[in-house]
Amino acid sequence: LILIGGFVQILAGFLAFRKYDHLGGAAFLTFSALWSSYGATRIIVAAYPSSQNITLEGFTAGSIAFLVLNAFLIILASSFNVVLLCMTLAMELLTICFLLFTLENLPLPFEIAMLSIFSIICFYGATASLANSMFGKDLMMMGPPLFTVESSKKDTEDPPPCICPKSHCTSGLRTIADLLNTGAVCGVPTDTVYALAASCKHPQAIEKVYRIKDRPQEKPICIFISNLDQLRAAAPPISPLLWEFMENVYPGGIGCIVKKGEWLKKLGVGAGYSRVGTQDSIMIRVPDLTVLVHLIDMTGPLAITSANPSGEVDSTHHNMVISRLGHKLEGVLCDGESDEVVASTVVNCTKIDESGITIVREGCIPAGKVMQIFESVKNR
């Protein structure tokens, strides 16, 4: 059980690093090392009693060193959250158990009590880290910091590498819209993960998106519109079945690939016509995020792709966009954590009347649900 606890600690550590929680990740991995060492020592001593003195002498010194190291972790954890603080305190007591064990002076009830307390805290902490990382939200509370360090942000923080207005401010939305309308590339929130946006009126901006991401030229870029009425006004040659399917999936995390045509220019794609989609098709999506819909109303259709270097994980917070690509962008619209941790689901609808739809990429909407929607629409 102790070794299993060590594995859980490793998992929690990697999840913490994935969310850029470096202290939490370092603490979890450090605890995993001690936790696993404790378990391994108990197993070795039980299996080979003759090696007890040799094995325990080294761990006695190691336990004392870890007590000092963990004391610093306790101080740091007090400024992060309650769960991490409780874990470091419990680990300090567990290290004392380890030390007493190596000195052959460990009361069994004390060991059981400490292991039980630490196991409960570890289980909650690991579960919370896993749940919060998977869903990109604080579903399980970690508690507020015990101490906060008062400091002037202007004095301690470096200025952002680009313009970073808040999404809840009208002025911030106008700032990003003005940048996009002048041919800039900006990071924006979506109803899935953060994205890079460029105005379809500026093909050079779409080209810049490819350079920023180091994206292969053969990978097409989709467009976002604010509502389905925009598409109707452009009068594309879309069948009744496809219209009804779109009405059931828009707005939301499903993008539909449709046949390309001159009607896109009526939609407002403009000079960027040749730089979005492929020669024959294009993916169109209507996002289910109010701030982005308002932005599109101010700019017209936007060329969109995920805000991450090509081949790397998606950005689920504006800080990730700023730290990874901010120096290459003119602006980032800051909206906190994204609603999803994976991108949208892409559906090929170019042959919907002949052979149905095809799932090109399964994302935040499961393929089974998409097919269920299609079958429901088809059988009406």
Image (cartoon, rainbow, N blue to C red):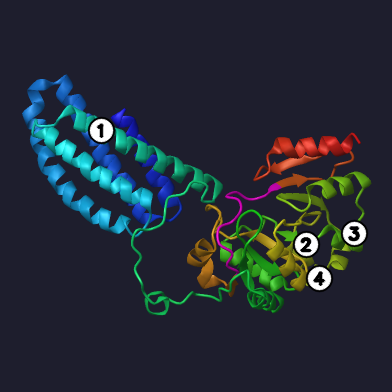
Q: Amino acid at mark 2?
A: Ile
Looking at the rendered image, the disc whose residue lies closer to the viewer, 2 or 4, is 2
**Could you tell me how far apart the alpha carbons at marks 1 and 2 are, in whole angstroms?**
59 Å
Q: Amino acid at mark 1?
A: Ala
Where's residue 78, x and y in %? 31, 57
Task: Give SS at disc 4.
Answer: helix
Few, some or many residues within 10 Å of mark 4 (<14, 14–19, 20+): some
Task: Give SS at disc 3.
Answer: helix
Few, some or many residues within 10 Å of mark 2 (<14, 14–19, 20+): many
Q: Is residue 339 magenta?
A: yes
Q: Quadrant of residue 205?
A: bottom right
Which contiguous range is marked in magenta? 333-345
Give the numbered dot on residue 232: 3
Task: Give SS at disc 1.
Answer: helix
Front-most of 311 and 125?
125
Q: Quadrant of residue 113?
A: top left
Looking at the rendered image, the disc whose residue lies closer to the viewer, 1 or 4, is 1
Give the numbered dot on residue 225: 2
Quadrant location, the N terminus: top left
Give the numbered dot on residue 113: 1
Where's residue 181, x and y in %? 71, 77
Q: Answer whether labels 2 and 4 touch (C-beta < 8 Å).
A: no
Front-most of 10 and 183?
10
Q: Is residue 277 left or right of residue 60?
A: right
Where's residue 123, x and y in %? 39, 37
Give the numbered dot on residue 146: none
Residue 225 in view (yes/no): yes
